[in-house]
Image (cartoon, helix red, strand yellow):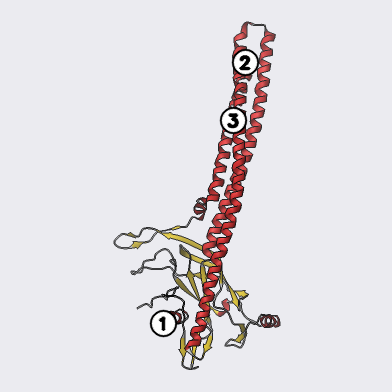
Amino acid sequence: PAVPPVPEEPPCARDPGLEAYKLWLVARYAIVRNETLSAFVCGEKLFATVDEALAHAHAQELQRVAAATARAEAVERAAREFAESSLRATQAAAAASLAQRERLRAWVAANRVVLAAICAVVVVAAALGGYRFGQHRKAEAAALAAAQNLALSAASDAKAADATLAEADRAWSAARSSAAKRLMDAEIARIEVTVSKGMYGLQYDARVRNGSRYHVQRLSGHINLFARGVEIGKSASIYCCDEAHDAHGFGMGYALAPGATGRKEMAVMSFDFKADSPEDRKFAAEHGIPLSRNLIGDLEYNLDSRTRFDGTVVFVTPGQKQDSGASIRYPTERVDFDALAEALPEVRALKGSRDAAAAVAADRRAALEAAEAALKAIRH
């Protein structure tokens, strides 16, 4: 039977005195006794007693919790700062939109009189057919001039309204795209990757934990490697992980559910962590990074187990299971971060300003069409 995965969180408080916590540390950090060396192994270190190994694992766990807390606080702080700046921009845009509407109302009120006057002039000019030819042409010329001026003014106002709409649309689109990227980056930041060297030093095990709120369909990118907290290189491209399957073996459309962990075995040549130059050795000495030799005698940095993932992730949400009797299908839908961004207050406010600008532009285009129709009637 398959061995159940080790829970990411302990079943009790992180108290080294609790037996349940000790057992969880043993399983979580793979503490084993090496009979050949007569020592306990935890990660890449040897300890004379199990208590020392447990103390090391406890320290690693506290570092992991502190790092996760710091990432969450950084994401929350960035989100708060973005929301505050967007709200200020939204308030300014709303005030400008209100002023535009007021100017439009005044313009329509003023030009309705002019339009009515133009129509009256046309009617009167047509009715005065019995008058002298010179009087008729004089009235017609006055009506034409008034209509031309009105059409020019309406065209200018419509052009200005279209420019305002384009700017409002750009501001809304930029805010939505920025917010969508921020939301996605926050979820990607919750992806945890740890590495540990295999038994014979010929490969590394990369364990990917999905700490996000969504299912991961696929993940690709690089792993940034650290030694003593200092970034020293990165892995070659990593792709993770295999598709998850149900109890019958049917694919479920995603690789990692929230909280799940996947494993990827990678050859040592996939990592850039050799210290084979004088510059590398000087760098290691200055930063207090221990070095060790691999099976073929090359010097290598002793890597931290904790890394940072840098790449792209496809997040999905699972749909309703479809059982046809002979087979089972699990549909998924890609997470639409643009739609999620549109629900944010600051993005909704900019959308409202954009809609207001669209209404103003539509009104001014209608006024332009009316002015052009009046001009055409007079000319014919």
Residue flagged by tag 3: what amino acid is it? Arg
In the image, is 329 to the left or to the right of 227?
Answer: left
SS for tag 1? helix
Q: Which residue was labeled with disc 1?
A: 19
Q: Which residue was labeled with disc 3?
A: 105
* Residue 339 in the image, given as x and y percentages of width and height: 49, 52
- Name the front one of labels 1 and 3: 1
Mark 1 and mark 3: span between their CA atoms? 76 Å
The N terminus sits in image quarter: bottom left
Residue 121 is marked as: 2
SS for tag 2? helix
* Residue 21 in the image, given as x and y percentages of width and height: 43, 79
Labelled pair 2, 3 in contact (Cβ < 8 Å): no
Residue flagged by tag 2: what amino acid is it? Val
Q: Is residue 102 above or below residue 350?
A: above
* Residue 156 in the image, given as x and y percentages of width and height: 66, 32
Q: Residue at x 68, y 21 (%)?
A: 145
In the image, is 6 to the left or to the right of 130?
Answer: left
* Residue 241 in the image, given as x and y percentages of width and height: 47, 70
Q: Residues within 10 Å of mark 2 (few under 14, many from 20)?
A: some
Q: Is residue 189 above or below residue 231?
A: above
Q: Is residue 165 above or below residue 85?
A: above
Residue flagged by tag 1: what amino acid is it? Glu
- Name the front one of labels 2 and 3: 3
